[in-house]
Every structure is written in C-alpha cells, then in structure tokens.
Amino acid sequence: MVGRYIGLTVAGLIWTATGSVAETALERGRYLVNSVVGCGNCHTPQTPTGPAPGMEMAGQFLIQNEAFKAYAPNISQDNETGIGSWSDGEIITAIRDGIRPDGTLIGPPMPFEFYRDISDTDIRAIVAYLRTVPATRNVVPRSTFNIPLPPAYGPPVTSVPDTPRNDPVRYGVYLTGPLGHCWSCHTPMVNGRQDFENQLGAGGQELDGPWGVAVTANITLHEDGIKGYSDDDIIQAITQGIRPDGSRLSPPMGFYYYSNIAADDLAAIVAYMRTVEPRPSP
Ligand code: HEC
Ligand code: HEC
C-alpha cells in the first residue's frame, strides 16, 4: 500500500498489523482518558457546559445516597493533595485493585469490577497520561460509607492481555466494560448490587447529583430502550447527548468525554450493544 510505505519512510512511524499507526503509550492514554474511559467525569469538577477549565482531575463531590457520601479525590499530579508522589505501580494498583499505597481500600462508585480487566498496555497508557495532568492544589474531603466495604475486590490483578481490535463485537465488550464501565450505570441494582447477569443494560438506576435526579436509560434493544434507533441515532446519543426526538440527555451520562471517541471505537460499541439481549426496564 502506497500510504503505508510513505508513512514508514516519511514520518518514521510504526504501523500495526491492521494498517493503523501505532500510538505511543502517552497518546493512547490521552485518548482513552479523554474519551471512553472518562476518569474526569468523576474526578474533574463539572460545570453545566462540561469539565471545569484548569481543574483537570482536581476532585469533586460526587454523590450521596443511603450507602455513602462519595468524593472523587484529587488525582492530579500535586504531591500533597493529589497523587504526584505515587509510583506508577501504586497508581495501577489503585485503579485495578482499588488499593491505596497505604493499603486501604478505595470505595464505590469507582467501578473496580470493570477496571480490574483493563489490559496491561492500556493501564500503563492511562498512567502515562495521568503523569502529564498539571498539579492542582485542592483538598477534597474523604468519603464516608454506611456500608461495610469488602476486604478486597478480588485477588490481586497480575496480568491482563490486550483484546484484539479486529473483532468489533469483542472489542465492543472491552470498550463498554473494562474501559467505559457503561454497564455499571446502565444496569438495575438488586440488593445493592448491579444485576449484570439478568438485567445488563436495562437501566433504571437513580443517580442524584448537581443535575437533579437522573434515571439511567435502558440501552438494550427492548421497546423500553433503544429499539428502532439506527446506528447513527445511538452514536448521536452517546457522543452528543441528544436522542432521536431531539431531547437532551442529562449528566452524569459522559457525552463531554464520549464526543472524543473515535469512529471505529463507536462502531465497535454499537456492534456489541446490538448483541445485548433486549430486556424491559425494571
Ligand atoms: C464513577 C466515578 C469514578 C470514575 C469513573 C473513576 N473514579 Fe477514581 N475514584 C472515585 C471515587 C468516589 C474515589 C474515592 C472513593 C473513596 O473515597 O474511598 C476514587 C478514588 C480514586 C483513586 C484513589 C485516590 C486517593 O487519593 O485515595 C485513584 C488513584 C483514582 N480514583 C483514579 C481513577 C482513574 C485513573 C480513573 C479512570 C481510569 C477513575 N479513577 C475513574 C470515583 C471514580
Ligand atoms: C455515570 C453513569 C453513566 C455511564 C458511565 C454511562 N451512562 Fe449512558 N446514560 C446515563 C444516564 C443517566 C442517561 C439518561 C440521561 C437522561 O435521561 O437524561 C444515559 C443515557 C444513555 C443513552 C441514551 C438512551 C436513550 O434513551 O436515548 C445511551 C445510548 C447511553 N447512555 C449509552 C451509554 C454508553 C454506550 C456508555 C459507555 C460508553 C454509557 N452510556 C455510560 C448514565 C451513564
């Protein structure tokens, strides 16, 4: 292929088997964090028009319910009030295992059941990007929990292989699960836990925040959900927060971040969503 040859010689870039340019870890991390992963949707103060400028990852009050009052801590590079002094390995353990350098467990709603399965390549990329987030001094109160936290979220994560990107449905599972944790919001709670097994994607969680009370949508192909949406309708809802009828979605649906998801990743997300069993809303 001519383009491939020119890319190799002129730009000196490395090409992957699928013919796309191999990104550096930092580029991959910047892309992930600012798109489908969207750590900032919780960790960056949000304004009615999106993330607060100059406050990236500086922390914010998140949510209060019967189970907890949760603050997303400052994870900017500030040494005292952020995670600037943590090693790369410590940050990886915090994200995938939910354990801080001092050994304490990090509580909900940080979605560890999904983050445990972020690949080694992607977790290193995410940390490479976090290292570039400017240090912002901002003291955030500690969360309080009225529920007992588990001793751990599972055995220590050792190694997670990459998910191949050439199978859209399989890569869509990875994008909407380990990376995007879409299902942690879009699945109904039964006895305080999401019922992933029987009601994946059926929505119905009430999320209370500065936006008021948002009920997560049913994103299965059931008539209570997105039956009848075209691929473009689904993509418009995800990336712009606009339904086919023109109505707007409320936060915490993360469309300010999802607007940066690449076209092939959106196609993979939709391909997988179309395979999820249609289920009624709770
Ligand atoms: C759904 C909201 C949410 C998302 C998304 C989220 N977090 Fe968190 N995170 C939290 C909350 C809440 C806490 C603190 C819980 C507590 O106080 O025990 C936390 C804690 C942390 C901590 C521990 C900080 C400390 O000082 O104790 C780190 C590190 C962290 N998150 C990194 C990340 C990264 C990186 C991402 C993206 C890959 C991310 N988080 C995505 C909500 C979230
Ligand atoms: C932090 C919670 C949260 C996460 C994570 C989340 N969503 Fe949402 N999503 C919502 C809420 C809340 C709504 C409904 C907003 C409203 O009704 O105003 C919504 C709405 C939607 C809709 C619109 C459905 C309709 O009724 O038209 C789609 C599609 C959607 N989400 C897909 C996704 C996908 C795909 C992901 C992962 C990339 C995702 N969501 C992640 C909270 C979330």
Image (spheres, rainbow, N blue to C red):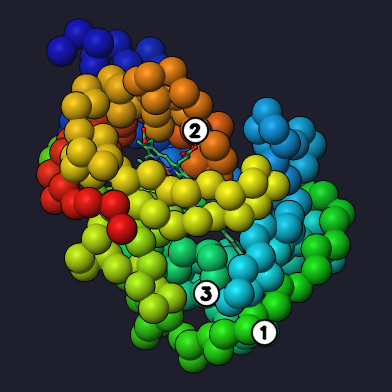
Q: Between marks 1 and 2, how big is the CA–CA gap?
A: 39 Å
Dot 3 falls on a residue whose secondary structure is loop
Name the residue nearer the viewer: 202 or 108: 202
Q: Which residue is mark 3?
A: 98
Dot 2 falls on a residue whose secondary structure is loop
**Mark sitting earlier along the chain (3/2):** 3
Dots 3 and 2: beta carbons under 8 Å?
no
Label 3: how many Cα within 10 Å (few below 14, some 14–19, many 20+): many
Give me the disc on residue 249: 2
Label 1: how many Cα within 10 Å (few below 14, some 14–19, many 20+): few
Q: Is mark 2 within 8 Å of ligand 2?
A: yes
Q: Nearer the viewer, mark 3 or mark 1?
A: 3
Give me the disc on residue 186: none
Dots 3 and 1: beta carbons under 8 Å?
no
Q: Is mark 3 within 8 Å of ligand 1?
A: no
Q: Tell me where residue 253 appears, x and y as whole percent.
A: 50, 41
Q: Give the farthest residue toward the top.
A: 2
At label 1, the amino acid type is Asp
Dot 1 falls on a residue whose secondary structure is loop
Q: Between marks 3 and 1, how big is the CA–CA gap?
A: 12 Å
Q: Which residue is mark 1?
A: 102
Q: Choose top left, top right, bottom left or bottom right for residue 198.
A: bottom left
Q: Choose top left, top right, bottom left or bottom right for residue 191.
A: bottom left
Look at 29% across and 11% down and name the residue there.
6
Residue 33 visible, this orientation: no
**Mark sitting earlier along the chain (1/2):** 1
Look at 82% across and 49% down and name the residue there.
136
Look at 28% across and 20% down and name the residue there.
232
Q: Tell me where residue 158 appears, x and y as whole percent.
A: 35, 76
